[in-house]
């Protein structure tokens, strides 16, 4: 009789545990969730590649199954891709870059409330399931500006950036703030290429800045580092460690690390507690979401007092003792580049 009662009690406990584990959104520790990455630009472009690398890291740790598609573009294909993925693959999370496809992403997210969506966006989150994030890497961009203003010999430094939108202007102005703080006499030339990914135009814009006297460049977009290496001028990368593109000329650069954001999202999904949020804080230096890229020994070629000044300011940022101004307006003296000629046209 006692044994029968014990077995009955055990069965009730197991049944209750199964019910708890089956609640909507909950994922058992042993399960791997499917995460799908949807990227408007090619993964060669650093912005989506940062997200991609964070998801590859999560997959390598055995936390997720990861699938993706890139170079979707801005001509209406994003909505079709997202709906197809939601219907056929049923992922727990769809993540990607939303700029230029905001309406499509929000429409699909609203139609699939049981799927978590998290997209780079200049807008806010949307209940119940669309979270937003951005590359809040203005702090390391400011530190790069400190270096640029300190080492320029011509008192002219250049920035080649995507387009005059808030998330890009933040970085441009932070870099400018650092450069002017280090050297009030410096001129910061800013050129927008009006594209998220146009290496040829970015390179041409960089060459034009060098011809106009710039001896230090900030490569907010892909293509600038090639120009800097050809002309043998110092350059800062962006988003990821880009030293390998020109080891003799890339000093460092703002690095965006999406792993803290991804880990937070996965924990929420596993707990069945996912909610729509603005995830920008996870990109701060203090949270480990941004940093300066390694110097790879290039710092040994720069004045020690410059590096010491930067490291001191970096420490103040990490401890919350200093804040970089957030300015999302385009500099009044910025210009827009003419698109590079397309072969055959």
Image (cartoon, grey):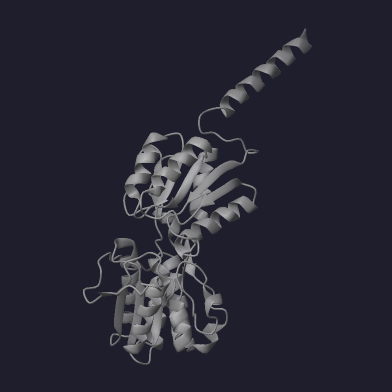
Seen from the viewer's position, the closer of residues 244 and 281 is 244
Residue 281 location (% of width, % of height) = 41, 55
Please state, as top left, top right, bottom left or bottom right, where the C terminus lies in the image.
bottom left
Seen from the viewer's position, the closer of residues 78 and 170 is 78
| Number of disc labels | 0
Please state, as top left, top right, bottom left or bottom right, where the N terminus lies in the image.
top right
Residue 319 location (% of width, % of height) = 44, 65
Give the left or right position of residue 275, taking residue 193 as reference.
right
In the rendered image, the residue lying farthest to the top is 1
In the rendered image, the residue lying farthest to the front is 344
* Residue 293 in the image: above or below residue 284: below
> Residue at point 39% right, 49% down?
132
Seen from the viewer's position, the closer of residues 326 and 310 is 326
* Residue 240 in the image: above or below residue 281: below
* Residue 23 in the image: above or below residue 34: above
> Residue at point 41% right, 43% down?
80
* Residue 251 in the image: above or below residue 232: above
Residue 334's quadrant in the figure? Answer: bottom left
In the rendered image, the residue lying farthest to the bottom is 153
Give the left or right position of residue 175, taking residue 330 as reference.
right
Residue 272 location (% of width, % of height) = 51, 35
Q: Is residue 321 visible?
A: no
Residue 74 location (% of width, % of height) = 36, 54
Q: Is residue 161 visible?
A: yes
């Amino acid at each position: 009789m006692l044994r029968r009662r014990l077995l009955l009690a055990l069965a009730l406990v197991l049944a209750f545990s199964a019910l708890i584990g089956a609640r909507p959104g909950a994922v058992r520790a042993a399960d791997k969730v499917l995460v799908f990455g949807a990227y408007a630009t090619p993964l060669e472009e650093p912005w989506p590649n940062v997200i991609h690398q964070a998801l590859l890291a999560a997959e390598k740790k055995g936390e997720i199954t990861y699938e993706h598609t890139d170079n979707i573009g801005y001509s209406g294909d994003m909505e079709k891709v997202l709906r197809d993925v939601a219907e056929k693959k049923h992922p727990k999370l769809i993540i990607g870059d939303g700029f230029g496809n905001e309406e499509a992403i929000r429409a699909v997210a609203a139609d699939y409330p049981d799927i978590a969506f998290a997209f780079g966006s200049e807008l806010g989150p949307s209940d119940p399931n669309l979270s937003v994030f951005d590359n809040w890497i203005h702090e390391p961009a400011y530190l790069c500006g400190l270096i640029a203003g300190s080492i320029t010999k011509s008192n002219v430094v250049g920035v080649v950036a995507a387009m005059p939108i808030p998330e890009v202007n933040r970085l441009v102005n932070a870099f400018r703030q650092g450069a002017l703080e280090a050297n009030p006499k410096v001129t910061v030339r800013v050129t927008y290429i009006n594209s998220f990914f146009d290496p040829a135009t970015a390179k041409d814009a960089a060459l034009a800045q060098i011809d106009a006297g710039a001896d230090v460049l900030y490569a907010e977009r892909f293509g600038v580092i090639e120009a800097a290496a050809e002309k043998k001028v110092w350059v800062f990368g962006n988003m990821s460690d880009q030293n390998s593109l020109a080891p003799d000329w890339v000093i460092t650069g703002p690095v965006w690390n999406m792993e803290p954001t991804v880990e937070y999202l996965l924990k929420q999904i596993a707990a069945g507690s996912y909610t729509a949020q603005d995830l920008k804080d996870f990109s701060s230096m203090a949270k480990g979401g941004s940093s300066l890229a390694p110097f790879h020994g290039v710092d040994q070629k720069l004045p020690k007092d410059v590096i010491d000044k930067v490291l001191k300011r970096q420490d103040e940022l990490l401890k919350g003792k200093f804040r970089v101004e957030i300015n999302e307006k385009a500099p009044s003296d910025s210009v827009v580049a003419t698109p590079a000629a397309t072969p055959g046209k």
